[in-house]
Image: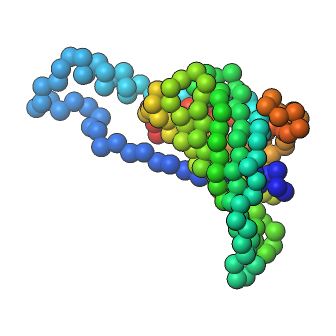
Amino acid sequence: MRRIALTFVPLFFVACSGEPTAPNPARPTAPGALRASVAAAAASSTEFDGFINFCHNAGLIGFRATPGGTVHFGVANENRWVTGNPLIDGLEHNTGDANINPYGQVVVRLQNSLKPDAVNGTWEIVQQLRIGDGVSTGVGHGTGDLQGMTIKFTTDPAFVPTSVCNPDDLKAGVHGVILSPAS
């Protein structure tokens, strides 16, 4: 259970824009600005598959029980994503919390920062895992070169050997999509 609790977790970020979807005819529009807004309006999606390799666990932090028997504790770990997509592949740092209710149900919530090796930016991700079905989901938004993009993913509940960054640890399959512009 410790390995699972330290591995991953998700939630959701939502971004909204107050920008109009078409130029205002009463307002003059510079030719370059119009071309830029049309180019930005062309949405794209790129699917990816790969692995999240578990590299280093910082341990469990701050165990406490609340009335009613729920156990709470913090988690932290470091992972390496390998998907073959340069907008994704890189090092991820996670922090989060886990709760175990009196019936043994475990929910882990992570806040992840994934720094791809090939770009100047990060994915700021919220992820959640309910231990039992083992599948986690995550949603994140890009910063820097990834600004305006959204990443959405699920992980495979089956862990497999061997992590590329720690031969004594495992990895989990990951499947998702990058959406541009952000949604």
Place of residue 67 in the rendered image (x, y in percent of width and height, measured from the top left): 70, 83
Quarter of the figure with residue 102? bottom right
Q: Residue at x 73, y 68 (%)?
A: 63
Where residue 106 appears, as percent x and y from the top left, is: 76, 63
Image quadrant in which you'd find residue 133: bottom right
Q: Is residue 133 visible?
A: no
Residue 134 in the image: above or below residue 100: above
| Front-lying residue, 75 or 4 | 75
Q: Which one is in front, 17 or 74?
A: 74
Tell whether 122 sits left or right of 162.
left
Which x, y percent locates residue 175? 69, 35
Report the front residue among 103 and 99: 99
* Residue at image point 49% right, 35% down: 142
Q: Residue at x 24, y 22 (%)?
A: 33
Residue 102 appears left or right of 126: right
Q: Quadrant of residue 164?
A: top right
Residue 11 horizontal side relative to residue 31, left or right:
right
Residue that sits furthest to the bottom in the current view = 67
Left or right of 175? Residue 24 is left
Count of marks, rendered view: 0
Res 35 visible: yes
When the figure is inspected, residue 40 is found, relative to residue 154, above or below; the finding is above
Question: Which quadrant of the figure contains the N terminus?
Answer: bottom right
Give the residue displayed 58% in from the left and 41% down from the top: 113
Which colour style is shown? rainbow
Residue 42: x %, y % from top left = 41, 25
Q: Work out whether 70 lies above or below 115.
A: below
